[in-house]
Amino acid sequence: MHTKPQEITAMADNSSRLSPLTIKADFPVLSQDINGHKIVYLDNAASSQKPQSVIDELSRFYSEDNANIHRGLHTLAERSTDAYESTRKRVAKFIGCQHPEEVILNSGTTAGINLIAFSWGEEHINEGDEIVITEMEHHANLIPWVVLAKRKKAVLKRIPITSDGRLNLDDIEKIITDKTKIVALSHMSNVLGTINPVSEIAEIAHKHGAIVVADGAQAVPHIPVNVTELGVDFYTFSAHKMLGPTGVGVLWGKKELLEKMQPFMTGGEMIREVHFDKVTWAGIPHRFEPGTPNIAGVVGFASAIDYLENIGMDKIRQHEIEITRYALEKLSKIDKLDIQGPTDPDIRGAAISFTDHNVHPHDISTFLDSKGIAIRAGHHCAQPLLRILGKVATARASFYIYNDETDVDKLVEAIIEMKEYFGV
Amino acid sequence: MLLDDMYRDVILDHYRSPRGRKPIEKKDFSSIGHNPACGDDITIQIALENGNISEVFAECKGCAISTASGSIMAEYIKGKSVVEVKQIAQNVRQMLKGEPCELPDDMGDIDALEGVKNFPVRIKCALLAWITLIEGIGNYESGHGDEVALASTEKSED
Protein backbone atom coordinates (compact mmCIF):
# COMPACT_ATOMS: atom_id res chain seq x y z
CA MET A 1 0.00 0.00 0.00
CA HIS A 2 1.15 3.44 -0.87
CA THR A 3 0.72 6.01 1.84
CA LYS A 4 2.49 9.13 2.88
CA PRO A 5 3.04 9.92 6.52
CA GLN A 6 0.30 12.18 7.86
CA GLU A 7 1.26 15.74 8.53
CA ILE A 8 -0.29 16.54 11.82
CA THR A 9 0.94 19.66 13.50
CA ALA A 10 -1.43 19.82 16.42
CA MET A 11 -0.05 16.63 17.84
CA ALA A 12 3.19 17.93 19.20
CA ASP A 13 1.18 18.87 22.26
CA ASN A 14 1.61 16.22 24.90
CA SER A 15 0.08 18.21 27.71
CA SER A 16 -3.14 17.17 29.34
CA ARG A 17 -5.09 19.95 27.60
CA LEU A 18 -5.49 20.37 23.90
CA SER A 19 -4.59 23.61 22.24
CA PRO A 20 -7.46 24.96 20.13
CA LEU A 21 -5.29 27.67 18.61
CA THR A 22 -2.69 25.21 17.33
CA ILE A 23 -5.45 22.95 16.08
CA LYS A 24 -7.23 25.83 14.35
CA ALA A 25 -4.11 26.41 12.25
CA ASP A 26 -4.59 22.95 10.71
CA PHE A 27 -8.02 23.92 9.30
CA PRO A 28 -7.69 26.11 6.20
CA VAL A 29 -11.36 27.13 6.19
CA LEU A 30 -10.92 28.69 9.62
CA SER A 31 -8.28 31.16 8.48
CA GLN A 32 -10.72 33.35 6.56
CA ASP A 33 -12.78 36.40 7.37
CA ILE A 34 -16.53 36.29 7.04
CA ASN A 35 -18.31 39.61 6.58
CA GLY A 36 -15.24 41.46 7.74
CA HIS A 37 -14.68 39.38 10.88
CA LYS A 38 -12.41 36.47 11.66
CA ILE A 39 -14.63 33.41 11.28
CA VAL A 40 -16.03 31.81 14.44
CA TYR A 41 -17.38 28.45 13.39
CA LEU A 42 -19.96 27.19 15.89
CA ASP A 43 -22.01 24.88 13.70
CA ASN A 44 -20.08 21.71 14.40
CA ALA A 45 -23.11 19.64 15.34
CA ALA A 46 -24.27 20.12 11.74
CA SER A 47 -20.86 19.43 10.19
CA SER A 48 -17.28 19.87 11.33
CA GLN A 49 -14.51 21.51 9.35
CA LYS A 50 -11.67 19.44 7.85
CA PRO A 51 -7.99 19.56 8.70
CA GLN A 52 -5.39 19.94 5.93
CA SER A 53 -4.32 16.30 6.44
CA VAL A 54 -7.79 15.06 5.43
CA ILE A 55 -8.01 17.42 2.47
CA ASP A 56 -4.52 16.35 1.37
CA GLU A 57 -5.38 12.69 1.68
CA LEU A 58 -8.41 13.09 -0.62
CA SER A 59 -6.23 14.82 -3.16
CA ARG A 60 -3.42 12.27 -2.76
CA PHE A 61 -5.82 9.38 -3.25
CA TYR A 62 -7.25 10.83 -6.46
CA SER A 63 -3.75 11.80 -7.66
CA GLU A 64 -2.02 8.51 -6.91
CA ASP A 65 -4.24 5.52 -6.11
CA ASN A 66 -7.67 6.04 -7.64
CA ALA A 67 -9.42 2.91 -8.97
CA ASN A 68 -12.52 0.93 -8.15
CA ILE A 69 -12.25 -1.47 -5.24
CA HIS A 70 -12.63 -5.23 -4.84
CA ARG A 71 -12.71 -5.99 -8.54
CA GLY A 72 -9.56 -4.96 -10.37
CA LEU A 73 -6.51 -7.13 -10.75
CA HIS A 74 -4.14 -4.25 -11.23
CA THR A 75 -1.91 -2.23 -8.96
CA LEU A 76 -4.16 0.80 -8.54
CA ALA A 77 -7.18 -1.39 -7.76
CA GLU A 78 -5.12 -3.18 -5.16
CA ARG A 79 -3.96 0.05 -3.58
CA SER A 80 -7.41 1.55 -3.39
CA THR A 81 -8.90 -1.70 -2.06
CA ASP A 82 -6.19 -1.83 0.59
CA ALA A 83 -6.76 1.78 1.59
CA TYR A 84 -10.53 1.25 1.75
CA GLU A 85 -10.30 -1.94 3.78
CA SER A 86 -7.68 -0.50 6.09
CA THR A 87 -10.13 2.26 6.99
CA ARG A 88 -12.59 -0.43 8.02
CA LYS A 89 -10.00 -1.84 10.41
CA ARG A 90 -9.15 1.67 11.58
CA VAL A 91 -12.81 2.37 12.36
CA ALA A 92 -13.21 -0.98 14.15
CA LYS A 93 -10.29 -0.21 16.41
CA PHE A 94 -11.51 3.35 17.00
CA ILE A 95 -14.91 2.20 18.29
CA GLY A 96 -13.61 -0.80 20.20
CA CYS A 97 -14.98 -3.62 18.09
CA GLN A 98 -13.06 -6.87 17.63
CA HIS A 99 -14.29 -7.79 14.15
CA PRO A 100 -13.72 -5.35 11.26
CA GLU A 101 -16.37 -7.20 9.21
CA GLU A 102 -18.92 -5.82 11.68
CA VAL A 103 -18.18 -2.36 10.30
CA ILE A 104 -20.36 -1.44 7.32
CA LEU A 105 -19.17 1.62 5.45
CA ASN A 106 -22.00 3.66 3.95
CA SER A 107 -23.08 7.23 3.29
CA GLY A 108 -23.88 8.23 6.86
CA THR A 109 -26.01 7.76 9.95
CA THR A 110 -29.27 8.01 7.99
CA ALA A 111 -28.22 5.16 5.68
CA GLY A 112 -27.30 2.99 8.68
CA ILE A 113 -30.61 3.43 10.49
CA ASN A 114 -32.62 2.88 7.33
CA LEU A 115 -30.72 -0.34 6.69
CA ILE A 116 -31.65 -1.68 10.12
CA ALA A 117 -35.27 -0.57 9.78
CA PHE A 118 -35.68 -2.04 6.30
CA SER A 119 -33.67 -5.20 6.81
CA TRP A 120 -33.84 -6.29 10.45
CA GLY A 121 -37.14 -4.47 10.96
CA GLU A 122 -38.78 -5.92 7.87
CA GLU A 123 -38.05 -9.45 9.02
CA HIS A 124 -38.65 -9.22 12.75
CA ILE A 125 -41.37 -6.64 13.32
CA ASN A 126 -44.95 -7.89 13.30
CA GLU A 127 -48.34 -6.41 14.04
CA GLY A 128 -48.64 -5.39 17.68
CA ASP A 129 -44.88 -5.40 18.33
CA GLU A 130 -43.42 -2.39 20.03
CA ILE A 131 -40.65 -0.07 18.85
CA VAL A 132 -39.31 2.24 21.53
CA ILE A 133 -37.65 5.57 20.72
CA THR A 134 -37.07 8.70 22.78
CA GLU A 135 -38.62 12.16 22.54
CA MET A 136 -35.27 13.71 21.68
CA GLU A 137 -34.55 11.84 18.44
CA HIS A 138 -33.23 13.46 15.29
CA HIS A 139 -35.50 12.74 12.31
CA ALA A 140 -32.86 10.26 11.07
CA ASN A 141 -33.52 8.04 14.08
CA LEU A 142 -37.22 8.78 14.14
CA ILE A 143 -38.80 8.67 10.69
CA PRO A 144 -37.46 5.19 9.74
CA TRP A 145 -39.19 3.86 12.90
CA VAL A 146 -42.40 5.83 12.33
CA VAL A 147 -42.56 4.40 8.81
CA LEU A 148 -41.69 0.87 9.94
CA ALA A 149 -44.32 0.96 12.69
CA LYS A 150 -46.96 2.13 10.19
CA ARG A 151 -45.99 -0.49 7.63
CA LYS A 152 -46.07 -3.32 10.15
CA LYS A 153 -48.94 -2.02 12.30
CA ALA A 154 -46.50 -1.98 15.19
CA VAL A 155 -46.72 0.37 18.16
CA LEU A 156 -44.27 3.24 18.46
CA LYS A 157 -43.60 4.12 22.11
CA ARG A 158 -41.33 6.79 23.46
CA ILE A 159 -39.21 7.51 26.48
CA PRO A 160 -40.16 11.03 27.64
CA ILE A 161 -37.75 13.80 28.59
CA THR A 162 -37.44 15.76 31.84
CA SER A 163 -37.75 19.54 31.96
CA ASP A 164 -33.95 19.85 31.89
CA GLY A 165 -33.67 17.69 28.79
CA ARG A 166 -32.64 14.31 30.18
CA LEU A 167 -34.43 11.03 29.54
CA ASN A 168 -37.05 10.37 32.18
CA LEU A 169 -36.50 6.73 33.11
CA ASP A 170 -39.12 6.61 35.90
CA ASP A 171 -41.49 4.48 33.84
CA ILE A 172 -38.89 2.72 31.74
CA GLU A 173 -40.02 -0.73 32.89
CA LYS A 174 -43.51 0.07 31.61
CA ILE A 175 -42.26 1.48 28.33
CA ILE A 176 -39.89 -1.38 27.46
CA THR A 177 -41.85 -4.63 27.71
CA ASP A 178 -41.73 -8.18 26.40
CA LYS A 179 -43.49 -6.86 23.29
CA THR A 180 -40.59 -4.47 22.58
CA LYS A 181 -38.49 -5.59 19.62
CA ILE A 182 -36.33 -2.52 19.04
CA VAL A 183 -35.12 0.28 21.27
CA ALA A 184 -33.62 3.09 19.18
CA LEU A 185 -32.03 6.04 20.90
CA SER A 186 -29.61 8.85 20.44
CA HIS A 187 -26.29 8.56 22.26
CA MET A 188 -26.07 12.35 22.35
CA SER A 189 -28.88 14.76 21.48
CA ASN A 190 -28.17 17.22 18.67
CA VAL A 191 -30.54 19.77 20.22
CA LEU A 192 -30.16 19.33 23.98
CA GLY A 193 -26.59 18.06 24.10
CA THR A 194 -27.69 15.36 26.54
CA ILE A 195 -25.55 12.24 26.72
CA ASN A 196 -27.99 9.40 27.28
CA PRO A 197 -27.37 6.40 29.57
CA VAL A 198 -27.26 4.01 26.62
CA SER A 199 -25.76 1.05 28.55
CA GLU A 200 -28.38 1.23 31.27
CA ILE A 201 -31.21 1.28 28.73
CA ALA A 202 -29.57 -1.46 26.63
CA GLU A 203 -29.49 -3.71 29.67
CA ILE A 204 -33.22 -3.25 30.26
CA ALA A 205 -33.98 -3.76 26.55
CA HIS A 206 -31.96 -6.98 26.41
CA LYS A 207 -33.75 -8.32 29.48
CA HIS A 208 -36.90 -8.16 27.36
CA GLY A 209 -35.25 -9.61 24.26
CA ALA A 210 -35.22 -6.36 22.28
CA ILE A 211 -32.32 -5.15 20.16
CA VAL A 212 -30.77 -1.75 20.75
CA VAL A 213 -29.88 0.74 18.02
CA ALA A 214 -27.85 3.77 19.06
CA ASP A 215 -27.52 6.90 16.92
CA GLY A 216 -23.98 8.02 17.59
CA ALA A 217 -23.80 10.87 15.06
CA GLN A 218 -23.25 13.46 17.80
CA ALA A 219 -21.37 11.20 20.21
CA VAL A 220 -18.50 9.61 18.27
CA PRO A 221 -16.94 12.95 17.24
CA HIS A 222 -16.88 14.18 20.84
CA ILE A 223 -16.64 11.39 23.42
CA PRO A 224 -14.70 8.12 23.60
CA VAL A 225 -17.07 5.43 22.33
CA ASN A 226 -16.61 1.71 22.77
CA VAL A 227 -19.47 -0.19 21.17
CA THR A 228 -18.63 -3.41 22.99
CA GLU A 229 -18.73 -1.75 26.39
CA LEU A 230 -21.90 0.15 25.51
CA GLY A 231 -23.67 -3.16 25.07
CA VAL A 232 -25.75 -2.11 22.06
CA ASP A 233 -26.53 -4.22 18.99
CA PHE A 234 -26.20 -1.56 16.30
CA TYR A 235 -24.39 1.76 16.33
CA THR A 236 -24.32 4.40 13.59
CA PHE A 237 -22.40 7.59 12.92
CA SER A 238 -21.18 9.95 10.18
CA ALA A 239 -17.66 10.93 9.13
CA HIS A 240 -18.40 14.55 8.28
CA LYS A 241 -19.18 15.52 11.86
CA MET A 242 -15.77 14.20 12.98
CA LEU A 243 -13.38 15.98 10.60
CA GLY A 244 -14.00 13.50 7.77
CA PRO A 245 -15.47 13.93 4.29
CA THR A 246 -19.21 14.24 3.64
CA GLY A 247 -21.11 11.24 2.32
CA VAL A 248 -19.31 8.68 4.47
CA GLY A 249 -20.68 6.88 7.49
CA VAL A 250 -20.55 3.76 9.57
CA LEU A 251 -23.04 1.17 10.69
CA TRP A 252 -21.60 -1.16 13.26
CA GLY A 253 -23.62 -4.26 14.07
CA LYS A 254 -23.13 -7.48 15.97
CA LYS A 255 -21.87 -10.18 13.65
CA GLU A 256 -24.51 -12.72 14.66
CA LEU A 257 -27.27 -10.22 13.76
CA LEU A 258 -25.70 -8.92 10.55
CA GLU A 259 -25.05 -12.42 9.24
CA LYS A 260 -28.73 -13.27 9.40
CA MET A 261 -29.90 -10.04 7.80
CA GLN A 262 -31.11 -9.65 4.24
CA PRO A 263 -29.62 -6.87 2.10
CA PHE A 264 -31.57 -3.64 1.90
CA MET A 265 -30.10 -2.50 -1.42
CA THR A 266 -29.01 -4.92 -4.08
CA GLY A 267 -26.69 -4.62 -7.05
CA GLY A 268 -23.00 -4.84 -7.81
CA GLU A 269 -20.41 -6.00 -5.32
CA MET A 270 -22.74 -7.53 -2.74
CA ILE A 271 -23.25 -11.00 -4.22
CA ARG A 272 -21.69 -14.42 -4.17
CA GLU A 273 -23.33 -15.90 -7.25
CA VAL A 274 -25.90 -14.54 -9.67
CA HIS A 275 -28.28 -16.38 -12.01
CA PHE A 276 -31.32 -15.11 -13.84
CA ASP A 277 -33.53 -16.87 -11.34
CA LYS A 278 -31.38 -17.00 -8.24
CA VAL A 279 -28.88 -14.85 -6.33
CA THR A 280 -26.78 -15.69 -3.31
CA TRP A 281 -25.49 -12.88 -1.16
CA ALA A 282 -21.93 -12.06 -0.23
CA GLY A 283 -20.95 -12.36 3.40
CA ILE A 284 -20.74 -9.41 5.75
CA PRO A 285 -19.90 -6.57 5.43
CA HIS A 286 -19.99 -6.60 1.59
CA ARG A 287 -23.60 -7.78 1.51
CA PHE A 288 -24.52 -4.34 2.80
CA GLU A 289 -22.21 -2.29 0.58
CA PRO A 290 -23.72 -2.48 -2.93
CA GLY A 291 -22.35 -0.40 -5.78
CA THR A 292 -19.23 1.72 -5.83
CA PRO A 293 -18.91 3.50 -2.51
CA ASN A 294 -17.35 6.88 -1.72
CA ILE A 295 -13.87 5.36 -1.88
CA ALA A 296 -11.88 8.57 -1.62
CA GLY A 297 -14.13 9.75 1.21
CA VAL A 298 -13.60 6.52 3.11
CA VAL A 299 -9.83 6.80 2.62
CA GLY A 300 -9.93 10.42 3.82
CA PHE A 301 -11.99 9.33 6.82
CA ALA A 302 -9.02 7.31 8.08
CA SER A 303 -6.98 10.52 8.17
CA ALA A 304 -9.72 12.17 10.22
CA ILE A 305 -9.61 9.32 12.74
CA ASP A 306 -5.83 9.63 12.84
CA TYR A 307 -6.18 13.31 13.63
CA LEU A 308 -8.66 12.71 16.44
CA GLU A 309 -6.72 9.82 17.92
CA ASN A 310 -3.50 11.77 17.86
CA ILE A 311 -5.14 14.35 20.07
CA GLY A 312 -6.91 11.67 22.08
CA MET A 313 -10.66 11.32 22.56
CA ASP A 314 -10.33 11.68 26.35
CA LYS A 315 -8.58 14.98 25.91
CA ILE A 316 -11.23 16.12 23.42
CA ARG A 317 -14.00 15.22 25.85
CA GLN A 318 -12.23 17.09 28.65
CA HIS A 319 -11.83 20.17 26.45
CA GLU A 320 -15.51 20.11 25.55
CA ILE A 321 -16.62 19.74 29.17
CA GLU A 322 -14.61 22.84 29.94
CA ILE A 323 -15.83 24.91 27.01
CA THR A 324 -19.42 23.80 27.67
CA ARG A 325 -19.13 24.82 31.32
CA TYR A 326 -17.74 28.20 30.30
CA ALA A 327 -20.36 28.75 27.59
CA LEU A 328 -23.28 27.73 29.82
CA GLU A 329 -22.04 30.05 32.54
CA LYS A 330 -21.63 33.01 30.20
CA LEU A 331 -24.83 32.46 28.22
CA SER A 332 -26.94 31.98 31.35
CA LYS A 333 -25.94 35.47 32.49
CA ILE A 334 -27.54 37.05 29.43
CA ASP A 335 -30.91 38.56 30.19
CA LYS A 336 -34.00 36.97 28.59
CA LEU A 337 -32.11 34.09 27.00
CA ASP A 338 -33.30 30.51 27.57
CA ILE A 339 -30.85 27.63 27.30
CA GLN A 340 -32.03 24.09 26.57
CA GLY A 341 -30.68 20.86 27.98
CA PRO A 342 -28.85 19.78 31.13
CA THR A 343 -26.85 22.39 33.07
CA ASP A 344 -24.22 19.88 34.18
CA PRO A 345 -21.42 19.69 31.55
CA ASP A 346 -20.51 16.19 32.77
CA ILE A 347 -23.71 14.73 31.31
CA ARG A 348 -23.88 16.73 28.12
CA GLY A 349 -21.95 17.67 25.00
CA ALA A 350 -21.04 21.02 23.56
CA ALA A 351 -24.13 21.57 21.38
CA ILE A 352 -26.03 24.36 23.12
CA SER A 353 -29.49 25.40 21.94
CA PHE A 354 -30.88 28.70 23.08
CA THR A 355 -33.72 31.09 22.37
CA ASP A 356 -34.11 34.78 23.00
CA HIS A 357 -37.39 35.98 24.49
CA ASN A 358 -37.80 38.48 21.69
CA VAL A 359 -35.48 37.86 18.76
CA HIS A 360 -36.37 34.97 16.44
CA PRO A 361 -33.63 32.32 15.95
CA HIS A 362 -33.37 33.17 12.25
CA ASP A 363 -32.73 36.80 13.04
CA ILE A 364 -30.18 35.69 15.65
CA SER A 365 -28.42 33.60 13.02
CA THR A 366 -28.43 36.35 10.39
CA PHE A 367 -27.13 38.87 12.91
CA LEU A 368 -24.37 36.59 14.19
CA ASP A 369 -23.36 35.78 10.62
CA SER A 370 -22.83 39.48 10.02
CA LYS A 371 -20.25 39.25 12.84
CA GLY A 372 -18.58 36.21 11.25
CA ILE A 373 -20.18 33.77 13.70
CA ALA A 374 -21.74 30.64 12.17
CA ILE A 375 -24.47 28.97 14.22
CA ARG A 376 -27.50 26.90 13.28
CA ALA A 377 -31.06 28.13 13.60
CA GLY A 378 -34.14 26.05 12.97
CA HIS A 379 -35.81 22.87 14.13
CA HIS A 380 -32.56 20.86 13.89
CA CYS A 381 -34.41 17.94 12.26
CA ALA A 382 -36.15 17.27 15.56
CA GLN A 383 -39.62 18.73 15.11
CA PRO A 384 -41.37 16.51 17.69
CA LEU A 385 -38.79 17.49 20.31
CA LEU A 386 -39.10 21.18 19.46
CA ARG A 387 -42.88 20.87 19.88
CA ILE A 388 -42.34 19.41 23.35
CA LEU A 389 -39.99 22.29 24.16
CA GLY A 390 -42.70 24.66 22.92
CA LYS A 391 -40.47 26.18 20.24
CA VAL A 392 -40.74 26.38 16.46
CA ALA A 393 -37.01 26.92 16.25
CA THR A 394 -33.94 27.45 18.40
CA ALA A 395 -30.51 28.88 17.79
CA ARG A 396 -27.70 26.41 18.39
CA ALA A 397 -24.01 27.02 18.99
CA SER A 398 -21.94 23.83 18.92
CA PHE A 399 -18.26 23.70 19.77
CA TYR A 400 -15.39 21.45 18.76
CA ILE A 401 -11.65 20.98 19.15
CA TYR A 402 -10.70 24.26 17.43
CA ASN A 403 -13.03 26.43 19.52
CA ASP A 404 -11.87 28.13 22.65
CA GLU A 405 -13.14 30.53 25.29
CA THR A 406 -12.47 33.49 22.99
CA ASP A 407 -15.08 32.08 20.61
CA VAL A 408 -17.57 31.88 23.48
CA ASP A 409 -16.77 35.48 24.42
CA LYS A 410 -17.33 36.63 20.83
CA LEU A 411 -20.66 34.79 20.73
CA VAL A 412 -21.83 36.32 24.00
CA GLU A 413 -20.72 39.80 22.97
CA ALA A 414 -22.54 39.48 19.65
CA ILE A 415 -25.75 38.29 21.32
CA ILE A 416 -25.71 41.30 23.63
CA GLU A 417 -25.12 43.59 20.65
CA MET A 418 -27.93 41.82 18.78
CA LYS A 419 -30.39 42.59 21.56
CA GLU A 420 -29.60 46.27 21.22
CA TYR A 421 -29.83 46.12 17.44
CA PHE A 422 -33.32 44.68 17.37
CA GLY A 423 -34.30 46.75 20.39
CA VAL A 424 -37.34 44.76 21.40
CA MET B 1 -22.92 41.67 3.60
CA LEU B 2 -24.58 44.74 4.97
CA LEU B 3 -26.93 43.80 7.74
CA ASP B 4 -28.56 47.22 7.70
CA ASP B 5 -29.51 46.67 4.06
CA MET B 6 -32.00 44.04 5.14
CA TYR B 7 -32.86 45.26 8.62
CA ARG B 8 -33.56 48.83 7.48
CA ASP B 9 -34.95 51.28 10.02
CA VAL B 10 -38.38 51.02 8.41
CA ILE B 11 -38.30 47.22 8.77
CA LEU B 12 -37.21 47.36 12.41
CA ASP B 13 -39.89 49.96 13.12
CA HIS B 14 -42.62 47.70 11.69
CA TYR B 15 -41.13 44.75 13.58
CA ARG B 16 -41.12 46.57 16.92
CA SER B 17 -44.62 48.03 16.50
CA PRO B 18 -46.51 46.00 13.92
CA ARG B 19 -49.59 47.54 12.29
CA GLY B 20 -52.84 45.75 11.63
CA ARG B 21 -53.18 44.05 15.00
CA LYS B 22 -56.71 45.29 15.78
CA PRO B 23 -59.16 42.37 15.46
CA ILE B 24 -61.89 42.78 12.83
CA GLU B 25 -65.48 42.18 13.77
CA LYS B 26 -66.91 41.29 10.38
CA LYS B 27 -64.43 39.95 7.88
CA ASP B 28 -65.07 39.32 4.17
CA PHE B 29 -62.22 36.89 3.69
CA SER B 30 -59.30 35.48 5.60
CA SER B 31 -56.24 33.32 5.18
CA ILE B 32 -53.55 31.59 7.19
CA GLY B 33 -50.01 31.20 5.93
CA HIS B 34 -47.10 29.10 7.10
CA ASN B 35 -43.41 29.22 6.31
CA PRO B 36 -42.03 25.78 7.18
CA ALA B 37 -38.45 26.94 6.66
CA CYS B 38 -38.65 29.26 9.67
CA GLY B 39 -41.83 28.18 11.40
CA ASP B 40 -43.39 31.59 10.78
CA ASP B 41 -47.20 31.82 10.86
CA ILE B 42 -49.48 34.61 9.69
CA THR B 43 -53.21 35.16 10.01
CA ILE B 44 -54.80 37.70 7.70
CA GLN B 45 -58.39 38.96 7.88
CA ILE B 46 -59.86 41.55 5.52
CA ALA B 47 -63.06 43.58 5.64
CA LEU B 48 -64.35 45.36 2.53
CA GLU B 49 -66.48 48.39 1.84
CA ASN B 50 -67.66 49.00 -1.74
CA GLY B 51 -64.92 46.74 -3.13
CA ASN B 52 -62.21 48.56 -1.21
CA ILE B 53 -60.26 47.16 1.73
CA SER B 54 -61.54 48.98 4.78
CA GLU B 55 -59.97 46.97 7.59
CA VAL B 56 -56.91 44.71 7.78
CA PHE B 57 -55.89 42.36 10.54
CA ALA B 58 -52.48 40.75 10.01
CA GLU B 59 -50.89 38.89 12.88
CA CYS B 60 -47.53 37.31 12.20
CA LYS B 61 -45.68 35.12 14.63
CA GLY B 62 -42.16 34.82 13.39
CA CYS B 63 -38.91 36.56 12.62
CA ALA B 64 -38.31 40.26 12.16
CA ILE B 65 -38.60 40.05 8.38
CA SER B 66 -41.89 38.16 8.22
CA THR B 67 -43.39 40.30 10.99
CA ALA B 68 -42.33 43.54 9.31
CA SER B 69 -43.48 42.34 5.90
CA GLY B 70 -46.94 41.53 7.33
CA SER B 71 -47.13 44.90 9.00
CA ILE B 72 -46.06 46.78 5.86
CA MET B 73 -48.68 44.87 3.90
CA ALA B 74 -51.41 45.64 6.43
CA GLU B 75 -50.62 49.32 6.30
CA TYR B 76 -50.23 49.55 2.55
CA ILE B 77 -53.32 47.74 1.31
CA LYS B 78 -55.85 49.57 3.46
CA GLY B 79 -58.13 51.74 1.35
CA LYS B 80 -57.16 50.11 -1.94
CA SER B 81 -59.38 47.97 -4.16
CA VAL B 82 -59.11 44.18 -4.12
CA VAL B 83 -58.14 44.14 -7.81
CA GLU B 84 -55.38 46.67 -7.27
CA VAL B 85 -54.05 44.90 -4.18
CA LYS B 86 -53.93 41.56 -5.93
CA GLN B 87 -51.76 43.06 -8.64
CA ILE B 88 -49.47 44.73 -6.12
CA ALA B 89 -49.06 41.52 -4.09
CA GLN B 90 -48.04 39.68 -7.22
CA ASN B 91 -45.56 42.42 -8.09
CA VAL B 92 -44.05 42.36 -4.62
CA ARG B 93 -43.61 38.63 -4.98
CA GLN B 94 -41.75 39.15 -8.24
CA MET B 95 -39.64 41.89 -6.71
CA LEU B 96 -38.57 39.65 -3.82
CA LYS B 97 -37.69 36.88 -6.24
CA GLY B 98 -35.57 39.32 -8.19
CA GLU B 99 -37.80 39.12 -11.27
CA PRO B 100 -38.76 42.12 -13.42
CA CYS B 101 -41.89 43.74 -12.05
CA GLU B 102 -43.92 46.90 -12.20
CA LEU B 103 -44.19 48.51 -8.84
CA PRO B 104 -46.55 51.38 -8.15
CA ASP B 105 -45.12 54.89 -7.85
CA ASP B 106 -46.36 55.18 -4.33
CA MET B 107 -44.87 52.12 -2.70
CA GLY B 108 -45.31 53.17 0.91
CA ASP B 109 -42.89 51.14 2.97
CA ILE B 110 -42.81 48.24 0.51
CA ASP B 111 -39.49 49.31 -1.01
CA ALA B 112 -37.85 48.71 2.39
CA LEU B 113 -38.36 44.99 1.69
CA GLU B 114 -36.15 45.16 -1.36
CA GLY B 115 -32.97 44.59 0.65
CA VAL B 116 -34.19 41.11 1.60
CA LYS B 117 -33.62 39.82 -1.92
CA ASN B 118 -29.87 39.93 -1.23
CA PHE B 119 -30.35 37.41 1.60
CA PRO B 120 -31.67 34.37 -0.30
CA VAL B 121 -32.42 32.30 2.81
CA ARG B 122 -34.70 35.04 4.12
CA ILE B 123 -36.78 35.74 1.01
CA LYS B 124 -39.50 33.32 2.07
CA CYS B 125 -39.88 35.25 5.32
CA ALA B 126 -40.70 38.42 3.38
CA LEU B 127 -42.94 36.54 0.93
CA LEU B 128 -45.17 34.91 3.51
CA ALA B 129 -47.59 37.82 4.07
CA TRP B 130 -48.01 38.50 0.36
CA ILE B 131 -48.63 34.94 -0.81
CA THR B 132 -51.05 34.46 2.09
CA LEU B 133 -52.91 37.58 0.99
CA ILE B 134 -53.02 36.31 -2.60
CA GLU B 135 -54.57 33.00 -1.44
CA GLY B 136 -57.22 34.90 0.55
CA ILE B 137 -58.12 37.09 -2.41
CA GLY B 138 -58.30 33.97 -4.60
CA ASN B 139 -60.87 32.45 -2.25
CA TYR B 140 -62.86 35.66 -2.15
CA GLU B 141 -62.90 36.03 -5.92
CA SER B 142 -64.13 32.47 -6.39
CA GLY B 143 -66.94 33.06 -3.94
CA HIS B 144 -65.40 31.17 -1.03
CA GLY B 145 -64.58 34.16 1.15
CA ASP B 146 -66.19 32.46 4.12
CA GLU B 147 -63.57 29.69 4.05
CA VAL B 148 -60.11 30.26 5.49
CA ALA B 149 -57.56 30.05 2.68
CA LEU B 150 -54.32 28.25 3.46
CA ALA B 151 -50.94 29.27 2.11
CA SER B 152 -47.45 27.88 2.49
CA THR B 153 -44.13 29.15 1.20
CA GLU B 154 -43.37 25.52 0.33
CA LYS B 155 -46.48 25.08 -1.80
CA SER B 156 -46.02 28.27 -3.75
CA GLU B 157 -43.67 28.39 -6.68
CA ASP B 158 -41.30 30.52 -4.68
Image (cartoon, rainbow, N blue to C red):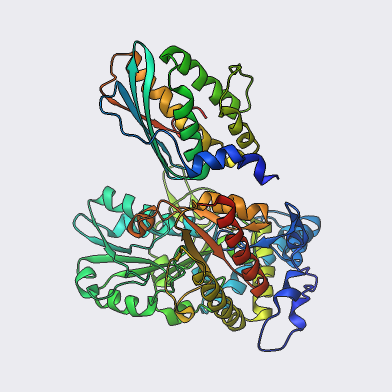
**In the image: residue A336, left or right of residue A365:** left
Q: Residue at x 79, y 60 (%)?
A: A60
**In the image: residue B6, left or right of residue A32:** left
Residue A251: % across, % down:
49, 64
Residue A11: % across, % down:
74, 80
All told, the count of numbered labels is: 0
**Residue A283 in sight:** no
Residue furthest bottom in the image: A15
User: Is A265 in front, or is A205?
Assistant: A205
* Residue A320 versus residue A155 in the image, above or below: below
Residue A316: % across, % down:
61, 78
User: Is A417 in front, or is B66?
Assistant: A417
Determine the image quadrant of residue B34. top left
* Residue A137 versus residue B13 in the image, above or below: below
Q: Residue at x 67, y 80 (%)?
A: A311
Residue A319: % across, % down:
60, 80
Determine the image quadrant of residue B111. top right
Quadrant containing the N terminus of chain A in the rendered view: bottom right
Q: Residue at x 44, y 57 (%)?
A: A357
**In the image: residue A342, left or right of residue A35:** left
User: Is A46 in front, or is A141?
Assistant: A46
**Residue A242 in sight:** yes
